[in-house]
C-alpha cells in the first residue's frame, strides 16, 4: 500500500482537537500522525514497565448494599479483524464504499463464567453491563490479547469504586486494576450508588488508552434507579471516528458503534406505543450532536430538544413514547460527520 | 483569481470537525477542499437520479389539532449574489474588510400566496415561520433555482411530520418531500405539537444538503406554547462560517445570519423594560458559544449563564427583561470566531 | 532556535476552531500562525490609537444594594516569565518533559491597597474575586506592563456593569474601562446581582485580547447567593492550551491554570465528609469536558454526570460531599488533551 500523498497525511492532524492524536504512553510521547503510527505506539506500550505497587489491594472490598445483588460478568479483551462497513454500501445515499474497510480492532468480549466459552464475538462496543442501585458489579476481566503485547484495563464511568478498581494506569501510583498484562485477570468491583443512575461508558485506561479506546475498547453501563421503568426499546450508540492512525486505512470513517454508514451502523427498530430510549455517548476527540428525524424529547432540564450536543465520554439520552411510524434517519448533526457515515436507520412500525 | 498558496488551501481542512468538508452527494463522495470545489459538488448533485418512489404520499395528511389553525407560507429557494459585509467594515475594530465579499448564496425567499410576488429578497436566514401548539404549518415550497441545477428541500426541526414531509433525500427510500427539482413545488405539512415548543432551525436536506446549507439554505421556526407570552423583542441568530469551498473566496468569514463583523451582522435593539429573547443556533460543522456583554439569564435548567455552548442545529435562548442601557457587543466566545467577525451590536435605550 | 519543520508549523492551524489563531487588533488582521507571531501582534497592538471618547464616564456609578458591601481589590497586569511545567515531569506517566517550558506570560497580580505592595506574584489564573449578591466589586486595575507596550483591560462575566465598566475595546465606541494603557489605572465597578450567582471568568478584552488572554490574562469571580453555604473546599480550574504562537515554544501544552501535566497542574486535596466544589471553565478556542475519577455529581438540571462539556468562558461546577478516599486523576476527557497534560491529582484523605 503506497504512502498517501502528504496533503492527505496532513489532514490527519485535523481529526483531533489538539495537534494530531498525541498519546503519552508510559514515559514516551507518541504522535499518531500516519497510518504507520499504531505499531510505534504498540511498541511503546510494550515497553511500559510493570508498576511496583500492584501486588495487593489497599482498600476494603465493597459489598452490595442491603437488598442489592452481585451482578457478575466475565469479559475479556482481544484484538479482532473488524469490518467497518460489512455491507460495502451506504444505504442512505446508495453509495458503494470502496477500498479496505477492515482493520485490527481491540474489543471487549463477553464470556461464560470462568471464561469457559465465548458468549459472543468481541464487538464494538463491548457487552452492555446492567445493574440497579444497590447492586455490586463484579466484572471478571481477562487480557486475552496475544498480538498487541500490552497491558489494558476496564475503567468505568458513573459507578463508585475504590482506587483499586479505577482501572487506570498511573505510573508508579498504579493500583491493582490499572495494569492487566496479557494472560492476566482481574476482578473489578463497582458499586451502583444512588448517584450512579444513568447510562455511562466504560473503556480502556491502561498505558495505551487513547489508541486502544479508539480501536474499540469501550462499552456501556446501564444503572437503573429504584423506581425506574426500563424502556421497551433501549439502544446505546457511541459516536466516534475511525481514523487512519488507528485503522491503517487511508480515510477517516465517521462511525457509530464501530460501523460506518446506514445499513452498517445499528438499525434500530420500535413499534408505535413503545417507550424508547437511545443513549448516545461520544467516544473520540470530537464533539457531536444527535438528531433523530421525526422525533423530539425532553432533555434533563425539561426543555424540548432534537439535536443535543455530546462530548467525549458524556452521555445524552433521547427518550420518548413512539408515535410516528416510518423509516427515519438518525445521525450526528455535524454535517461532515453525517455525510461521512455517522448516520443510521430507525424503523418504526 | 490565482490559486491560493497551498498552505492556505490546507488551512481549509481545519474548518470542519472532520477531514475537510466531506460531502456525500447521491452515491459520490466529494471533498470540498478548495475554492473550485463547489462546481464539482454541483455537478455531482445534478447527476443524482430522481428516486423512484416519489410519486405519492403514503401517510395520511395531518390536520390542525382542535382549536389549531393552518399557518400557510409560500417559500421558494433560489440562488442570489449575497454580500457578506455590505458596509465593507468591521465596526467593532474600525477595520476595513478588503477584497471580495460577495458570492453566490442559496437562500429561501418568502412569497405571496400562489408564488405570485416576492415578499422580500432571498435572505440568509430565510423567513422565520411562526405557529402555536395545535397549529399546522403548511409550507408551499418551490425550487425556483435555475443556475444550480439540483434538487433541494426544506427539512424542519422541532415539529412533527410524517416521512412524506421530512424533506430528506434518502436515495431509493426518498419520500415525496425529499427531492424537489428545479421548477417543482411541494407542500410540507408540519404539526406544532406540545413537545414542539421552542425555536428550531429548518434547512435543506436534499442530495447536496451540506454545501447548500452552508450556502445559506436555512431559517428558523418559532413555536409558542399555550400559555406563552411572546417576548417584546425577539431575534434569531445563526452562528456559522462561510468558508472558501462554499464562497470561492480565499478567506473564511465568521458569520452571523450570513453576514460578518459588527455593522453587517444583525444590530439588535431594545428598550429598558422590554422582554427580550435571542434564539441562537449553530449552522455549520463547529461548536460555538454565545455571549452578550452586560447581560445574564437563566438557562433551561435554571442556572444563570452568559456564555452557553451551542452545537450544529441546536438552539439556546437568552431571555431576560432588559435593564441595562448602552451599546453592547454580542459574540461567539470562541476567540478566533469573534475576532473573525462572529460578533454584532446590541443597542439598548 | 531553528525554525520548526513546516509540518509542525502547519499543525498549529489545527489548534483553534477557525483557520489558525486569527486576531483582529485595532484595524489589523493578524494571523498567529507561528512562533514568531506574537511580536507581530504586539506591534499591531502598540499601533492601536487611543479611542477618543475615553475621557469621562457616561453612566451613573453603581452602588452596593442595601445591605451589600464594597469588595475592594487592587490588581495589576504585567508580564512575567512563567514556567508551564516547573517539576519538569508528568507525574501521571512518570514522563520527563523535555525542552523549554517557560515563556513570557501576561498575568494579573493582586496588590495591597494603593498598589503599595504585591500580595503575590502575577499568576495564571489571576486572583479569585469574591462577592455576595448585593455587593459591589470595586476593582482598582493598573496596567503595570513595560515590555509589551499595549492597552489591556479586565472584562468580567456574570456580574452587572454599565458600558463604562465593560472593559472592552470597541474602536471609536470604547468606553473608559476599555483601553488602559501602560501606567494607567482604572477602577471597575461591578455589581453582584441576584442573577450573578455562580462562578465566572474575567479576562482581558482590550485590542489584543485573544493573544493576551491566551497568554494568561484571566481569572475567576465567585458570587454567593443569599442562602449559599460556601463549600469546605473550592477550586477554580481553567482548561486551555498554551500554543506555539503564544509561547514561542515548538509544541502545544495542554494546560490547567497555566500548567501542564499532573504535578504541575493544581493538586487538589480534600478530606472525607467535606463539601467540595470544583468550578471548571474553558479558556481557549476549544471545547473540553471534565472528568474526576471516582466521583459523580448532579449538574444544574439534576442529572448525574461525571464528564460534562464546557466551552470557552463557560463554567461547569462539580459539587459533591467527599466520600471516596484515595489518589484520583482529574482531566479533560478529550483524549489528546488528557494525554498532552490537561490532567492533575485530586488527593482525598
Image (cartoon, coloured by chain):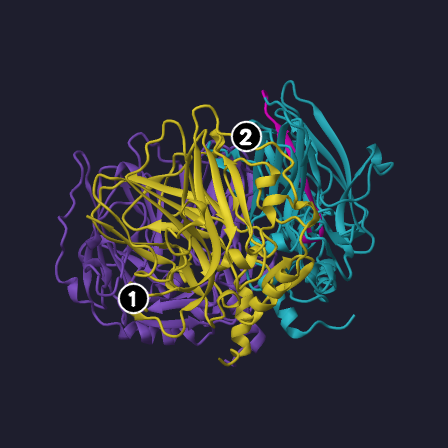
Chain colours: A yellow, B purple, C cyan
Foreground residue among C8 and A31: A31
**Does residue B236 belong to the magenta stretch?**
no
Does residue B104 appear to the left or right of C289 in the view shown? left
Tell which of B126 and A8 is nearer to you.
A8
Instruction: Check the image and report above or below for B131 versus C224.
Output: below
Most foreground residue, C99 or A82: A82
Residues rendered magenta in the picture = C213-227
Label 1–label 2 contact, CB within 8 A = no
Q: Chain of mark 1?
A: A
For the question of whether residue B65 can be seen, the reply is yes
Q: Which residue lies most toward the right here?
A: C116
Q: Secondary structure at mark 2?
A: helix
In the picture of the structure, the residue carrying the numbered disc 2 is C195
Viewer-nearest of discs 1 and 2: 1
Label 2 is found on which chain of the structure?
C
Q: Is residue C217 magenta?
A: yes
Q: Which mark is residue A93?
A: 1
Label 1 sits on a secondary structure element that is loop
Rendered view: C142 above or below A215: above
Q: Is residue A327 left or right of residue C93?
A: left
The answer to whether residue C84 is left or right of residue A181 is right
Amino acid at each position: 500500500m503506497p504512502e498517501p500523498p502528504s496533503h492527505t497525511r496532513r489532514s490527519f492532524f485535523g481529526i483531533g482537537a489538539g495537534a494530531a492524536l498525541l498519546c503519552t504512553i508510559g514515559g514516551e510521547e507518541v504522535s499518531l500522525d500516519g497510518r504507520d503510527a499504531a505499531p510505534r505506539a504498540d511498541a511503546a506500550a510494550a515497553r511500559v514497565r510493570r508498576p511496583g505497587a500492584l501486588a495487593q489491594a489497599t482498600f476494603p472490598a465493597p459489598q452490595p448494599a442491603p437488598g442489592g445483588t452481585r451482578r457478575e460478568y466475565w469479559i475479556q479483551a482481544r484484538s479482532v479483524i473488524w469490518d467497518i462497513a460489512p455491507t460495502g454500501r451506504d444505504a442512505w445515499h446508495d453509495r458503494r464504499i470502496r477500498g479496505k474497510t477492515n482493520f485490527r480492532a481491540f474489543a471487549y468480549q463477553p464470556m461464560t463464567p470462568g471464561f469457559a466459552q465465548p458468549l459472543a464475538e468481541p464487538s464494538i462496543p463491548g457487552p452492555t453491563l446492567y445493574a440497579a442501585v444497590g447492586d455490586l458489579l463484579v466484572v471478571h476481566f481477562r487480557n486475552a490479547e496475544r498480538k498487541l503485547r500490552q497491558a489494558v484495563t476496564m475503567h468505568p464511568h458513573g459507578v463508585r469504586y475504590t482506587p483499586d478498581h479505577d482501572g487506570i494506569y498511573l505510573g508508579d501510583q498504579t493500583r491493582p486494576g490499572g495494569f492487566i498484562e496479557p494472560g492476566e485477570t482481574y476482578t473489578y468491583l463497582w458499586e451502583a450508588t444512588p448517584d450512579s443512575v444513568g447510562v455511562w461508558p466504560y473503556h480502556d485506561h491502561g498505558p495505551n488508552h487513547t489508541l486502544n479506546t479508539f480501536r474499540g475498547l469501550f462499552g456501556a453501563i446501564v444503572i437503573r434507579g429504584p423506581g425506574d421503568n426500563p424502556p421497551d426499546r433501549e439502544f446505546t450508540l457511541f459516536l466516534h471516528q475511525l481514523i487512519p492512525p488507528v485503522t491503517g486505512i487511508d480515510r477517516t470513517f465517521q462511525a457509530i458503534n464501530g460501523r460506518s454508514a446506514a445499513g452498517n451502523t445499528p438499525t434500530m427498530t420500535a413499534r408505535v406505543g413503545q417507550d424508547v430510549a437511545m443513549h448516545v455517548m461520544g467516544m473520540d476527540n470530537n464533539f457531536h450532536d444527535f438528531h433523530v428525524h421525526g422525533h423530539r424529547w425532553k432533555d434533563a432540564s425539561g426543555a424540548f430538544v432534537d439535536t443535543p450536543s455530546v462530548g467525549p465520554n458524556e452521555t445524552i439520552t433521547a427518550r420518548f413514547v413512539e408515535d410516528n411510524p416510518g423509516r427515519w434517519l438518525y445521525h450526528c448533526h455535524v454535517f461532515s460527520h453525517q455525510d461521512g457515515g455517522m448516520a443510521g436507520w430507525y424503523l418504526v412500525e
